[in-house]
Image (cartoon, grey):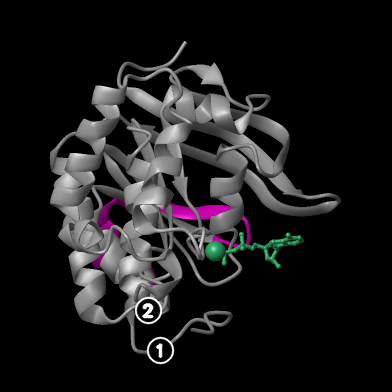
């Protein structure tokens, strides 16, 4: 039983790498149509959280439910078919392959979805990031960092997901390019896509999100509407100030 409108629900999730526990009881929900941000310093466990959601790291206790069904044992291809898509940290593109080949791979997991739907998805990706159409025949490795991030997002969108998971899309990019990518995320959200965004850049993430969670050493220490978190004194001091938190080694 889940609340109406809840797409993703984590309940007391413990996870880690072998015997190294990283997440210590995470409760988190994402409702349909929301853009939710998870912020926290480097090493807080944000990437591990996304990996736990898609089953790339083992969940030792608690549950991850997508549309009310546990995803713990689901295989990655199955999750893509069910509408989850992850844009991993570092993008993980196929460098020697062209932009259009990378995008085609994103559609592969969509399996039985019709060809026409894939063509439609490609048209939407091109409308969102016109540079990907201009560079369709270029190897992915010849793109700029920003273009590669656009390609990684575009590839995830090719599976026509209901829930897009993004790991630090701003990492290593120039402000102008970051603005372009976040404008695209706003547009996707306005179009009804549900987004869970992990970011070290707290201000950026909270400015675009409906709600946020603050993680610290594998725990959620604060959560609420983005406006509240942006106004919160402890968030301002630790995550938004000129003063950098310990462990925030950007
Ligand atoms: N593959 C791994 N094996 C063991 N420990 C890991 C691995 N990946 C990350 N960790 C550890 O898990 C903790 C959280 O890392 P991570 O989830 O990457 O944090 P964040 O994404 O917030 O920077 C860190 O202490 C990190 O060293
Ligand atoms: Mg990370």
Q: Residue at x 43, y 27 (%)?
A: 110
The residue lying at 53 percent from left, 16 percent from top is: 69
Q: Nearer the viewer, residue 96 or 86?
A: 96
Q: Position of residue 95 (x, y in %)?
A: 50, 65
**Residue 232 visible in the displayed image:** no
Inter-mark Cα distance, 2 to 1: 7 Å
Q: Secondary structure at mark 1?
A: loop
Residue 246: quarter of image: bottom right
Q: Position of residue 51 (x, y in %)?
A: 60, 47
Instruction: Determine which residue is flagged by label 2.
Output: 237
Q: Residue furthest front?
A: 137
Q: Nearer the viewer, residue 137 or 205?
A: 137
**Residue 93 point in image, percent of width and height:** 49, 59
Q: In the rendered image of this protein, does residue 172 appear above or below residue 114?
A: below
**The magenta segment:** 216-234
Residue 250 versus residue 83 in the image, above or below: below
Question: Could you tell me residue 150's position as x and y percent?
Answer: 31, 60
**Disc 2 residue lies near ligand 1 with CB under 8 A:** no
Report if residue 120 lies within the magenta region: no
Residue 20 in view of the camera: yes
Dots 2, 1 in contact, CB < 8 A: yes
């Amino acid at each position: 039983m889940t609340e109406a409108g809840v797409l993703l629900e984590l309940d007391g999730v413990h996870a880690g790498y072998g015997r190294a526990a990283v997440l210590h009881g995470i409760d988190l929900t994402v409702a349909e149509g929301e853009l939710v941000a998870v912020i926290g310093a480097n090493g807080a466990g944000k990437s591990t959280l996304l990996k736990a959601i898609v089953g790339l790291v083992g969940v030792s206790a608690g549950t991850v439910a997508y549309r009310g069904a546990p995803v713990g044992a689901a295989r990655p291809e199955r999750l893509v078919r069910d509408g989850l898509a992850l844009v991993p940290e570092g993008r993980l593109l196929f460098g020697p392959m062209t932009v259009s080949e990378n995008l085609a791979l994103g559609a592969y997991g969509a399996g039985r979805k019709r060809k026409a739907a894939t063509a439609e998805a490609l048209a939407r990706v091109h409308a969102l990031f016109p540079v990907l159409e201009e560079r369709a025949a270029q190897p992915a490795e010849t793109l700029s960092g920003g273009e590669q991030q656009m390609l990684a997002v575009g590839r995830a969108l090719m599976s026509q997901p209901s829930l897009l998971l993004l790991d630090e899309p701003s990492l290593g990019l120039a402000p102008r390019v970051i603005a372009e990518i976040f404008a695209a995320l706003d547009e996707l959200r306005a179009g009804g896509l549900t987004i869970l965004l992990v970011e070290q850049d707290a201000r950026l993430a909270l400015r675009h999100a409906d709600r946020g969670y603050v993680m610290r050493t594998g725990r959620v220490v604060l959560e609420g509407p983005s406006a509240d978190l942006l106004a919160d004194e402890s968030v301002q001091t630790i995550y938004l100030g000129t003063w950098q938190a310990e462990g925030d080694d950007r």
